[in-house]
Amino acid sequence: MPHTHLPVVPVAPILNLDARPPLETHPVPSVLDAGDVRLLTAGRLGECHALRLLGIGPGDRVLLPAYHCISMLYPIQWLGAEPVFYRLHPDTSIDFEDMAAHLAAGAKAVIATHFFGFAQDIGRVRALCDAHGAALIEDCAHAFFGQWQGRPLGSFGDYAIASPVKFFPVFDGGCLISARHSLEAVRPRTGDAAFQIKAVLDPLERATLYGRLSLLGSLLWLKNTLWTALKRRRGRTDGAAAPVIGPSSSGGGAELALEWLETGMSRAARLGMQRGRRASARIAQARRANYRRLAAALSGLPGCRPLRPELPDETVPYVLPLLVDAPAQVFPALKQARVPVLRWEDMPEAALTACPVANRYRSALLQLPCHQALRSHEIDWIAAQVRAAVAAAGTGVPA
């Protein structure tokens, strides 16, 4: 594709003109089935609300996994609380002995993350929190769909958060969920017209750029026309800077963007999420098939291995985590090839010191997409790029 500033294949779900209409009557269990729900613009803002509803404040200790996305840390710091990092095993499951020791030392809340869509033993986390009088926030940012022992993920915590933008072709979206407490105090307001328009146009533009809506290329012209009008409306006629019309998370940023804390999910994102929910069985099937195809293509190679080669029956993956032996060579090579690969590099020193897994994985654990919008040849292209980069790292030849 000609847009050389973009990854060659989409990093997240995009609209597809030839997608079949959702006709399913038995959707896959999701966080929307887990309890009362409030629809926000970003999952990290759901964490802000959850911590605030729990009364977290200065001096309170909040446990979180040492290996984490830095955006998880910001809400804790915003409230002046103390982040305390617990260890993980190499498969990213919780080190319960370490968690119990931290709880015994005193903590007001625990954040438990279902990494990459793989469920933690969340019933055990719940029991441990109850035994120590700590609240539980279930981080389902990677696990919009899934169950544990017959219950939807998100139903075990005092509160849970989720990130629809990782699973559906929408511009914005975050969920705050609770099966235990009222969410009456959280009343998001409707975003302004500029935000609502951008939420419609952005998914259309991304799909067009990736050739999924080639017949609607004129929408790019429409978007630019509307943007000019919006800038004028906001007093920006010089074209020097675009107005901020969405949370930073919608553009892939890690910032907290508190100015969006009280704004609700856009109408377009709500519709996209509900449509995706009705198509959840096909979404789950496609993600699982893509994960398995990519894992099979990368298994048995020297220099890398899928961290979780097997998919449990109830798992709907977010990405495929790939552990590489030479990240200093492989990651830049993949970026140069415009592969949509991610890793969590930015973690505080306290987390890296607390957990050898976090210290290694900040550079060596790569996240490769497996979402439902990827086609078979795109999965194969990703695998080929990884194989080439890993092989070059092993021989010292540039990929």
Image (tube, rainbow, N blue to C red):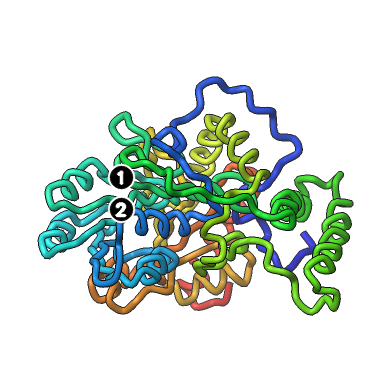
Rendered view: 174 above or below 85: above
Which amino acid does the dot numbered 1 rest on?
Gly
> Can you tell which of label 1 and label 2 is closer to the viewer?
1
Q: Position of residue 37 (x, y in %)?
A: 46, 40
Of residues 261 and 388, the one drawn nearer to the viewer in this rendering = 261
Determine if residue 19 is in view.
yes
State if disc 2 and disc 1 touch (CB < 8 Å).
Answer: yes
Of residues 322 and 389, the one drawn nearer to the viewer in this rendering = 322
Q: Position of residue 198 (x, y in %)?
A: 73, 55
Q: Which residue corresponds to the image point at 45% horizontal and 54% vertical from the top-left?
A: 46
Q: How many marks?
A: 2
| Residue carrying label 2 | 112
Q: Residues within 10 Å of mark 2 (few under 14, many from 20)?
A: many
* Image side of residue 73 versus residue 341, left or right: left
Kind of element beneath mark 2: strand
Q: Which residue corresponds to the image point at 58% horizontal and 23% vertical from the top-left?
A: 24
Rendered view: 8 above or below 355: above
Q: Which residue corresponds to the image point at 58% horizontal and 29% vertical from the top-left?
A: 278
* Image side of residue 133 versus residue 72, left or right: left
Which amino acid does the dot numbered 2 rest on?
Ala
Kind of element beneath mark 1: loop
Q: Position of residue 219 (x, y in %)?
A: 85, 51
Determine if residue 303 is in view.
no
Q: Which quarter of the rendered picture does the C terminus lie within?
A: bottom right
Q: Which residue corresponds to the image point at 76% horizontal and 54% vertical from the top-left?
A: 205
Residue 152, image quadrant: top left
Q: Furthest-front residue in view?
A: 185
Rendered view: 396 above or below 129: below
